[in-house]
Image (spheres, grey):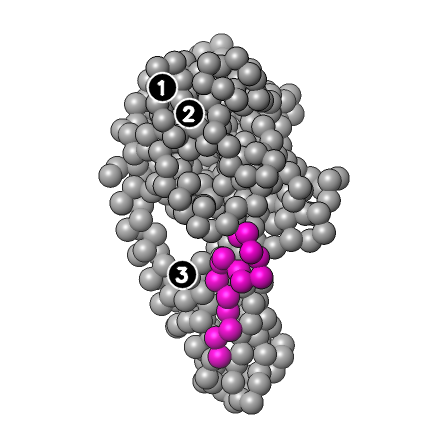
Amino acid sequence: MRCFLPKRIKALWLIGTLLLLSLLLQGGGYYRGVPTRAQLQEALELVRQRSSGDPDMAFFELDVNLEKNKLVLRGKVGDVEQKLLILAGFQQFSLPVVDQVEIFPFRQISMPYAWVRTPWLDGRTEPKAEAPLKTQFLFGSFLKVLKTQGDWALVQSVSDRFIAWVPYPEILPVAEAKFNEWIAFDSVLVHNAETQLFQDEALTQPLLKLVAGTRLPLQKVLDSGYQVLVPGATGANTAFVNKEDLRLFIPGQPLIAEALAAEAKRWLKVPYLAGGNTIKGWDDSACIQHLYRQIGVLLPRKSSQLLPLTLAIRDSNQLKPGDLYFYGQQVGLYLGNDDVLHALPEQGQFLVSSLHPGNPRYFKPLQTGFKQGARLLLGN
């Protein structure tokens, strides 16, 4: 269950990282003399902004202190690239830097990964049940455990790096060695709206129901179904699913516009739900993420996170099926023939509207609010 990015996107990401590193080394000038605490905190905030990018995708808990004419950096960050950018950012001070920054997986967490073991799990903005819904993680999703607070855990999705708070008792902690083993498996994807997970190969003992978009590690292909690995109450279990309800998840496939349009029309009855990420209700970016996942493409969770993976299209006449359509504060999906799949949050629904004024399905805000189109860089 790896997160696959086309080589071209990886190259662009590397170039962007190097440019950011250069900016950090050059930006802001150099402090002369002994920096004050206020200057250190100002620099720390600047480094956080430049190294972390979107806070919904980057973990940053860091402090900096001046000790014996040295800058001591302590805390935790999510990955090594982020750490390198942070260290580079503090070169603006003409002082030695003592690196005490820890990179995930963090030492004090014995089980640094986790598995979602409910059909879906609500992710909150804060560690409390009444906090706003931020996203939802489907059954079998692998998570990084960044920190715990009481009965809550701050987790990051392995597939799209999105961060949210979840109830800790509802996830299955996983050791790093097991995670590395299971993440290497091929996977299957639930294609139907719902499918039954069974305890036995004969498919007679129901376990629980899964919803569309769920991905599970594949153990074996059987005559009538798939044998998959699933999280249980205390560890990994073997389970079985009907082959007709699932498909092999094969990343890196060429974009087939007709397949994407067909998927879009399949899910038009899913209601709009801010922060939702299942077929019981989702927001505009989660809908697009789901549609692309069904054709083998893993996308980020938020529409703003999609832009670095795209080429901007300023003229709506140049759009092709599969392009993203940014208008107002929302994102839609261009289906071709002047049709756009988009949300109506105030009405709690999705629909396909036309950009053509003469069409009875014409939706004027799509034109008046148009900001840009965006074409995903999916080439290998």
Local secondary structure at mark 3: helix
Q: Which residue is mark 1?
A: 222
Residue under the image location 59 percent in, 39 percent down:
234
Q: Which residue is mark 2?
A: 227
Residue under the image location 73 percent in, 44 percent down:
128
Q: Which residues are magenta?
A: 98-112
Q: Nearer the viewer, residue 52 or 187?
A: 187
Amino acid found under the numbered disc labelled 1: Leu
Q: How far apart in space, not on screen, are marks 3 and 2 (Cα)?
A: 37 Å
Mark 3 and 1 residues: CB-CB less than 8 Å, in contact? no
Mark 2 and 1 residues: CB-CB less than 8 Å, in contact? yes
Residue under the image location 42 percent in, 33 percent down:
217
57 up-or-down from 361: above or below: below
Amino acid found under the numbered disc labelled 2: Gln
The C terminus sits in image quarter: top left
The N terminus sits in image quarter: top left
Q: Nearer the viewer, residue 184 or 335?
A: 184
Q: Residue 242 placed where, x, y %?
A: 44, 16
Q: Which residue is mark 3?
A: 81
Residue under the image location 33 percent in, 33 percent down:
251
